[in-house]
Image (tube, rainbow, N blue to C red):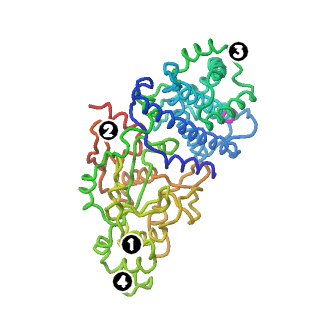
Amino acid sequence: MRIVALVVVALMSAQPLVAQRAELTKLPRDVRAASQRADAEAVMVYRDGLQALVEYAKSRRDLFPVAALDEPMPLTPEQRGEVRAIWRSFLDYQLALESVRSFHASYQRLSGGAERDSFLVMHGAFLAAYRTALDFIELVDRNPGYEVLLDDAMPELGVDAGTWSRFKFRYLNVAIAAEFAAYDAARHLYDGGNASLLAAAGADRNAIYEAGKGTGPLLTAKNALQVIKDTGAQSWLPLQTGVATWMGDTRVYREGVALISRELVASIRPSLRPGDILFERREWYLSNIGLPGYWTHVALYVGTAEERSAAFDDEETRAWVKSQGEPSGELNRLLAARYGDAWKVSTSVDHGDARRVVEAIGEGVSFTSLEHSAGADSLGVLRPRVPAHEKAIAIARAFGYAGRPYDFEFDFVSDDALVCSELVYKAYEPGAGMAGLALELHELAGHRIIPPNEIVRQWSREAAAKRPQFDFVLFLDGVEKKRSAVRATEAALAESWMRPKWHIVATMSSK
């Protein structure tokens, strides 16, 4: 489980991806070099993600039996959901590797040593995908019932029905054996390069050989180059227009510039109240690969001391504060007395801006400014339908978690460390004197968690049933083509959880 967590954390600390970058051979030398370095790093991260998923699948003998079955294994609805979730994440990583490989397929047209670096990226991506595909196919094929289950469409990834069949055909075909042999022959033309990538490629190549796979025709280096030229740039899945380009893009596009501007953040600040929950989406990030759903981050708005004084000047909150040992009944006095270090940080400034948000990020549970946290590409805000004193309790709990590290284990049971949605979940978790929020946990790689996207999904479902636990506050919807975010409706936010990860591609091509 720690492997899975480490991979996700590595992804969450990665840099943003670039949109529809120019063809490899047309990139300026410095941009191309940065692209090669970034894509080499991406291949390693995607490879780790795939291997972690394979190892997790092997550990789940209730889902993936150790030997082939003659008849489909009966599964509960929850187990079927788990299998689909594993396949969805696995395919997500595979698609990312495929697009990186395709982008660098024109490496032969480079010169001056640049061709070697792109070849290594292409070769490494190919081997990582091939090796893990063979492992995963072997696991899935042990249960004949999975053929139908995994062939379902996955609109969140932009792929239609029949994906599993196409995936198997890609990796259990004589053409890929020839491609494997071609790469293996061509690699002898290049010396040196990224040591980590070379080591990973060597391990993957040996594993494929040992498995008795990929023993295609022997090729000379000259013939191998022709095979690669003929087949290396072909994509194996009919993705939605623009998706392959989106996934293969490197981390130099719109770097440091969000679609939600400071001016737009300033305009929404009067609409926010302490206790509100912020859902955020940042495009062109490696963290969007392998994580479930459109919304990938969530934070808690705690406001400034002045905002809290105005929001919690009610009888119930004062009574609760007094019950906690603060005779004045003032929430801020309780926070300052009980959480001194956190209070000092919360009342300081973040690059000149007041700290109004608490969130679990790579650096740990931190107080940040609204300008920093909401300076994303899309932002949704929901307000819990709980009494004021329960929002005060949630904020006090969040202050208590401040400074704790990011949760490398994705363990909602332990409070030692927290992930972003875990912070919100525990802030509003029902308890003594706290009806709180009943947020539904989901199974993800062996952990019971609630991804940010699932909170939005739950609100949408409950709102449709006229029993929402949240009120809609606002939705700033990023539009890449306009290089800005626009105010959108409650209905749009309610449907946003269904968006494919490449929703931004559609907005780029829309009128």
Cα separation, mark 2 vs mark 4, equals 47 Å
Amino acid identity at mark 4: Gly
Q: Which residue is denoted by mark 3 in the rendering?
A: 218
**Residue tagged 4:** 329
The span from disc 3 to disc 4 (Cα, nearest Å) is: 80 Å
Query: According to the image, label 2 marks what residue?
Result: 480
> Would you say the residues marked 3 and 2 are in contact, meaning their CB atoms lie under 8 Å apart?
no
**Is 411 left or right of 58, judged from the image as shown?**
left
Magenta span: predominant SS is: helix
Q: CA distance from mark 2 to mark 1?
A: 37 Å
Element class at badge 4: loop
Pick whichever, 70 or 96, lies toward us. 96
- Residue on which the image places disc 1: 392
Work out whether mark 2 precedes mark 4 in sequence or the reverse, and give the earlier one. 4
Magenta region: which residues?
Answer: 137-141
Marks 3 and 4: which is nearer the front? 3
**Residue type, numbered disc 1:** Ala
Q: Nearer the viewer, mark 3 or mark 2?
A: 3
